Image (tube, helix red, strand yellow):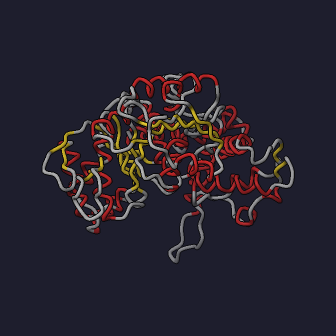
Amino acid sequence: MTRPIKSVLWLDDPQAPSSELPNILIRNGLLLSTGPGPGKGLEMLQANRFDVVFIQLTRDLEYEPLLRQISDLETPVPSIVVARDPSVSEAVSVMQAGAVAYIEPPLTSNSVTSALDKAAMACESAPGSVGLHSRESGRKRGCVKIIGKSKAIKHVFLLIKKLCDTDTTVLIQGESGTGKELIAQALHYEGERRKGPFVSVNCGAIPEELLESELFGHEKGAFTHAIRTRIGRFELAHGGTVFLDEIAEMSPMLQVKILRVLQDHQFERIGSTKTIKSDFRVIAATNRDLEQEVKKGNFREDLYYRLNVVMIKAPPLRNRISDVPLLFENFIEKFNRSGKKSISKIDPDLMPYMIKYSWPGNVRELENTIERMVILASGKRLTIEDLPSRLLNSEPIKSGEITEIPSEGFYMSEVTAEFEKNIIIQALDQTNWVKNRAAKLLHVNRTTLLEKMKRHNMGAREKRMMNDEL
């Protein structure tokens, strides 16, 4: 869910060796402007709009003040530092000073693209959306947008508010596409560690033999291809947060090492006997049930309890279906801003199809679906004809749906009561629990709605659910 990068400022040092960076950026279709040197960088950034700035790090450059000044601009610009044979202390300082990425020559298209992806994630800030905003209004880089007004997402906001200023380890559990990394970013950027780096590691996307080096770093010559010292993610995250995504994919050997790091925040780079201590917070995420993985022997029990100090459950979209219209509007605005299309009208008959679909891929599937509809739309209006077939042919979501009557039968009164209760909850969620509006939505009198809520003991039920989850 990141905005596209279009314009780039390259602050080159005239005294430094020539770089391949400009050619790579131009080949990727980016609009490139080159500055005469880092000293003029702030002036150029104040006078022009850029999506990202690359800075050539040299020995005599006062990079920390420059990075901090860029972060303090009215519209901050993500900074990526390019360094040649840096010292370890320089690399750590660069990340702590506000750089979102740090790359070393030889530059490749993959390394530059990866850095640009981090910059796009850092500057993601969709105006007009409903969500949790940074307490420092001037620091838009830390403004994490979690869209929604439903009861389920409000509960996530409440937990973020309670946990953001602590160093408590948090485990985020949820299906793929539910926005687990957005929750992790909110915990970081809304808290006291927001001035430090947010370092994300996808444990499932990095090969097992490379993951240890990514996390802990290695010394030059530690193994065959270790041609220079590499700083690990735990070391780079000093003063900030390490986000371990898909933690369940980690091998048993690494699980043991991670347990030690969580206990005392100390580790050694591969090929070194020197112990490094780093100050960071750990947030982990998984789409699996770790408790079941422990029972199966796939995940260490002691590590599970160390990670699961507090759990935040990222709700699937089918459980916050009242947020679909908000998300729909947000994504339409996003794709309009990207220049792909200009959608100005929405067919009123289209939204019921969006709401009744179960969205197994959650918010990610919704975003991809809307992008496809925008791109393929024949004009400036979205109609039912723009919907993919799976939405047109989908069955409505039915709470407590009975697909087959069991041989022993069931009490129909219990089934209908459960269905009625779930319908009332959906109506209350959709109207922000304003009972008059919920009653109108269900076409019943307010007194009838209150009687049904009392019959289902819903007030006490909701209070118990909130206390249990907290």
Location of the C terminus (image quadrant): top left
**Residue 46 percent location from the top left of the image:** 59, 22
**Residue 111 percent location from the top left of the image:** 47, 53
Would residue 116 be found to the left or right of residue 262 on screen? right
The image shows a total of numbered marks equal to 0
Residue 339 visible in image:
yes
Residue 21 vertical position relative to residue 454 in the rendered view, above or below: below
Residue 458 vertical position relative to residue 384 in the rendered view, above or below: above
Q: Residue at x 45, y 37 (%)?
A: 56
**Residue 394 percent location from the top left of the image:** 70, 64
Of residue 331 and residue 28, the one placed in the foreground of this image is: 28
Q: Residue at x 76, y 59 (%)?
A: 387
The residue at the far bottom in this view is 407
The residue at the far right in this view is 379
Of residue 308 and residue 74, the one placed in the foreground of this image is: 74
Would residue 293 be found to the left or right of residue 378 on screen? left
Residue 428 visible in image:
no
Of residue 314 and residue 21, the one placed in the foreground of this image is: 21
**Residue 403 percent location from the top left of the image:** 60, 70
Q: Residue at x 45, y 43 (%)?
A: 17
Q: Quadrant of residue 184?
A: top left
Would residue 234 be found to the left or right of residue 195 on screen? left
The residue at the far left in this view is 273
